[in-house]
Amino acid sequence: MKKLLIAGAVLTVSSVALAQQFIITPVESNRDLERRIWRLERAVQELQMKVYNLQNQQTMPALQAIQIVNQKRYFCKTTPFMRTFKSYGPTQMEARERVVSECSAAHNEMHCRDVKCEINE
């Protein structure tokens, strides 16, 4: 295998071909430099997209888990006539409204006003 010494590093024939793409020689024209810059910018753009996609893949399950937890942030219940109605919600008002709706379907609404709510941990 043919070897070449460049700046104290020994390169093999295959790595020489790769290294030659990025070596600037004094005889390069402006057009060659522009082509090289375009290739480097494109490579950076592709790497940025890969990093962005990897970050999204890792954070999406975490965001979905947070949304599920937030859907059950508040817990409310009421017990008219020995029957308990309970519900969860992302806000206290929503959890309370769900309990009152369920209770009102079974009893008169005046019996469903004593709703107790707490933060679900």
Image (cartoon, rainbow, N blue to C red):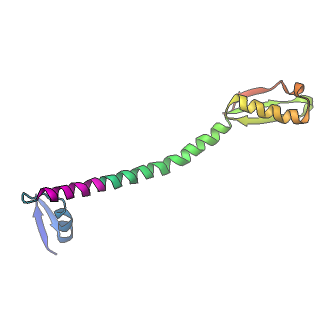
Image check: 22 left or right of 48? left
Q: Position of residue 83 (x, y in %)?
A: 89, 34
The quadrant the N terminus occupies is bottom left
Q: Position of residue 78 (x, y in %)?
A: 83, 29
Q: Nearer the viewer, residue 100 or 61?
A: 100
Residue depicted at x 30% and y 52%: 44
Is residue 25 inside the magenta stretch? no
Q: Nearer the viewer, residue 24 or 37?
A: 37
Is residue 30 inside the magenta stretch? yes
Specify the principal SS of the magenta part: helix
Of all residues, the one furthest to the front in this rendering is: 31
Of all residues, the one furthest to the bottom in this rendering is: 1
The mark tally for this picture is 0
Q: Position of residue 32 (x, y in %)?
A: 16, 59
Q: Is residue 55 above or below residue 105?
A: below
Q: Quadrant of residue 100?
A: top right
Image check: 5 left or right of 45? left
Image check: 101 left or right of 9? right
Residue depicted at x 64% and y 39%: 69
Q: Quadrant of residue 117?
A: top right
Residue depicted at x 42% and y 49%: 52
Image check: 118 left or right of 106? left
Q: Position of residue 12 (x, y in %)?
A: 18, 69
Region in magenta: 29-42
Q: Quadrant of residue 19?
A: bottom left
The quadrant the C terminus occupies is top right
Q: Nearer the viewer, residue 91 or 34?
A: 34
Residue depicted at x 14% and y 73%: 2
